Amino acid sequence: MLAAMSTPALPSSPLATAVSRDRGDACPGTLRLHAADDGALARVRIPGGVLTVRQAAALADAAERLGDGDLHLTSRGNVQLRGLADGCGGELTGLLDAAGLLPSHGHERVRNIVASPLSGLDGRGVLDVRPWLTALDAALCASEAARDLSGRFLFALDDGRGDVTGLDADVTVRATADGGAQLGLGAAGEALHVRAEEAARAALVAAETFLEAARTSGARVWRVEELDRPAEELLDAVGRRLTAEGIRHEPRARETGRADGPLPGALSSSLSVHVPLGRLTVRQWRELTHIAADELRLTPWRGVVLPTQGAPTAESLSRLAAAGLVTDPDSPWLRVGACIGRPGCAKSRADVRTDAAGALGAVEPHGLPLYWSGCERRCGHPRGDRVDVVAAEGGGYRLSTAVSGQEPRTTSMDDPARLATALAAITS
């Protein structure tokens, strides 16, 4: 029941996941839509989750004019538009192109970059990763080789606080206290230390080296964890390529992270809100853009950070709460996630979002997070410890704990109203 955690001809790694695919990467984008039960779906990549107010307004227009009127946040800080009508692809492309959201049509699915959402705002990071974000996105779009990356390949830019380091991205760059940067691959325990000013270039070199290794393997490999070699050996290959490129580096032990996002509420120079199940109406989205000073930052935890000019006001926070967004750091919504479920997905066995909302009162404030899924694929499930609540064949749900270092504990639940009893059976 638990999600599989996985990593020139080399020995197979015991951590690697066997990959056998009979087709190419079908990950949706903006130019290639996915046919879902509720209409076509577009996934708009937002590097670092950073949107100008003008770009956010363009997305709201697209959702209202062409889609179901909602904007769906993903676990990578991207935006999905659902319920799109047949034949709207050209109009959608035009809207997003005009807003600067498609700088390269050939790279639109590979611009998967998460970044520390509070970087440069609260003084807790080692440095502001925005220059890295700008440089890496530009380098990606300029690289012909990078066009071959899967739409699932992920970069993470961590300002030193360790928040996005915990997401186990394919390529992670983390700022270090000595003014440099740590370059890590997948979940490998080793890293390469490079100069901060060369961090974005080094990240692209790592991705291009992965592509070379993937071609050598002869299999359709989309993530670092899927290669038939230990990530440490791929890191050695990256080091050789860095040397050839004139980028100085040295091996170091890798720092760990927690994959924790900012709590909702008023912060030192921003407002933070959580979006229940990642779904925003156009009205809620526009309320965010009205309050935002210049930009919005979407987080990998389905939240939004609004940088403010000066200290954030209680009035703004109240407006966001009144719009139905979570501003309370103790809200149970912070511990609940779900896939799209019925009626949007044909594979789903249940309307998991309605069931999750109806059982919210059973979620303990300090217990394991819950992730509701309509089938065993558990699309969009988070990293880290949790309880998987998976719709079962014939009705009801199967609950399983996913806790690092522990064997899973499982139980069945015939009715979501009995969630508290089911949780007690596997977590007490």
Image (cartoon, rainbow, N blue to C red):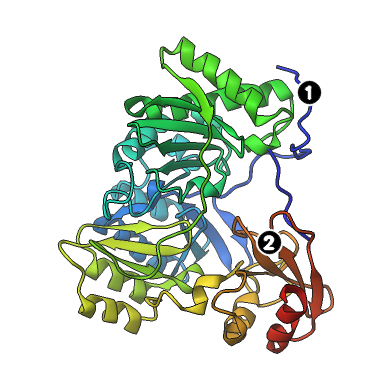
**Most extreme residue toward the bottom, as rendered?**
417
User: 10 Å neighbourhood of mark 2: few (<14), some, or many (≥20)?
Assistant: many
Q: Where does the N terminus fall, quadrant-wise?
A: bottom right
Q: Is residue 84 visible?
A: no
Query: Residue 225 occupies which quadrant of the picture?
Result: top right
**CA distance for labels 1 and 2:** 31 Å
Instruction: Between residue 50 and residue 241, name the one nearer to us.
Output: 241
Coordinates of residue 31 in the picture (x, y in percent): 48, 46
* Residue at 61% in and 35% down: 188
Instruction: Name the residue at 46% across, 30% down.
Output: 203
How far across and how far down the image is residue 197, in percent? 32, 27
Residue 391 — which label?
Answer: none
Q: Secondary structure beneath disc 2?
A: loop
Specify the quadrant that holds the C terminus: bottom right
Measuring 76% from the left and 38% from the top, which residue is drawn there? 19
Viewer can see residue 386: yes
SS at badge 1: loop
* Above or below, comparing residue 232 to residue 392 in the picture: above
Q: Residues within 10 Å of mark 1 (few under 14, many from 20)?
A: few
Q: Is residue 143 left or right of residue 133?
A: right
Disc 2: which residue: 378
Q: Which residue is mark 1?
A: 11
Give the number of the mark in front: 1 or 2: 1
Q: Is residue 151 above or below residue 285?
A: above
From the viewer's perspective, is residue 366 above or below residue 215? Answer: below
Amino acid type at image mark 1? Pro
* Residue at the outermost right position: 394
The amino acid beneath tag 2 is Arg
